[in-house]
Image: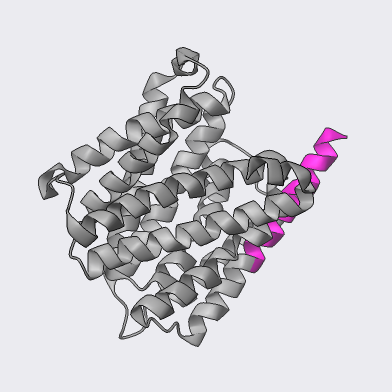
Amino acid sequence: MTRLLSRLDPAIAGPLLIILAGALFALVNTLLQYGAMVQGIAPSRLAFWQYLIAFLCTVPLLFGKGRSVLRTQQLPMHVLRVATAAAGVQLWAMSLAHVPIWQAIALIMLSPFFVTLGAHLFLKEVATLERWAAVTVGFAGGMIILAPWSDGFSAYALYPVGAALLWAISSLLTKRMTRTENARTLTVYLLLLLTPLNGLIAFRDGLALDTGSAGLILFAAGVLTALAQYALARSYSIADAAYLQPFDHVKLPLNVGLGLAAFGFVPPGSMWVGSLLIVGASFFLLQREAKLDAIKAD
């Protein structure tokens, strides 16, 4: 696969990889939702085994260059960053146990707007009028999808919003830590600490690996997660994030399609309206940031 990608233009290989990652994550989400809703596996145990198996799949890659990657100046920050990520993982797993995938995946796309808001509040980044407009439109789209005014509203729908917020906090901590930590060290500590933290959270529900079809679901989810993470990392290593972002949004119809096929979840028209606002606002925000970065570089 690596040889094939090396022969392709980065403008083609990057989008192909990020679409592949989105498809793999869509399969993972479907497996997790099936495991929780149909098999009755506790969401916390799903998350624990998913990331433990994913970690085991990536160990050879992570430690191929020795243990120097473990050298760090910010161990407490690593723990805090991964703790917020682990909490986000748990909320995401719980959302898949109660919320249709179309709603969960659309709401998780609010994360970039939380990042923008947090960057202004905590990292003291300048918030332009364009940024505030994009954040406002994005959250308006989220409100349309949540529809808290409707009779069908469930508090469980707040789980993916909480996951988006926690993952945004983790992203902000990562951004701050890049001043002294390299990407490899950040990745290693994420995978090293995520599994035990997930284990602590899941301890009450039991950590036993299920057998039969339930065990196969856990194993498949872990392997696919590792492959998806690799495809995602490779895509961003060969192409700019702003260029790739529109292709990342392909994950929305992929998840909706699998949710429809596996569970018969049919999204209402309001989901597409809200998603259009979120996707449009995030695309505008990323394009704007790319232009600002280009101006700074000049």
- Nearest the viewer among 232 and 57 is 57
Residue reaching furthest right? 298
Q: Is residue 70 above or below residue 57?
A: above
Horizontal side of residue 290 vs 197, given as left or right: right
Can residue 110 be seen by looking at this rendering? no
Residue 106: x %, y % from top left: 48, 68
Q: Is residue 198 above or below residue 144?
A: above
- The stretch in magenta equals 280-298
Name the residue located 29 percent from the left edge and 74 percent from the top edge: 154
Residue 195: x %, y % from top left: 30, 36
Residue 102: x %, y % from top left: 44, 73
Name the residue located 44 percent from the left edge and 44 percent from the top edge: 226
- The part of the image, by quadrant, that contains residue 107 is bottom left
Name the residue located 60 percent from the left edge and 63 percent from the top edge: 249
- Nearest the viewer among 5 and 152 is 5
In the image, residue 286 lies in the stretch drawn in magenta: yes
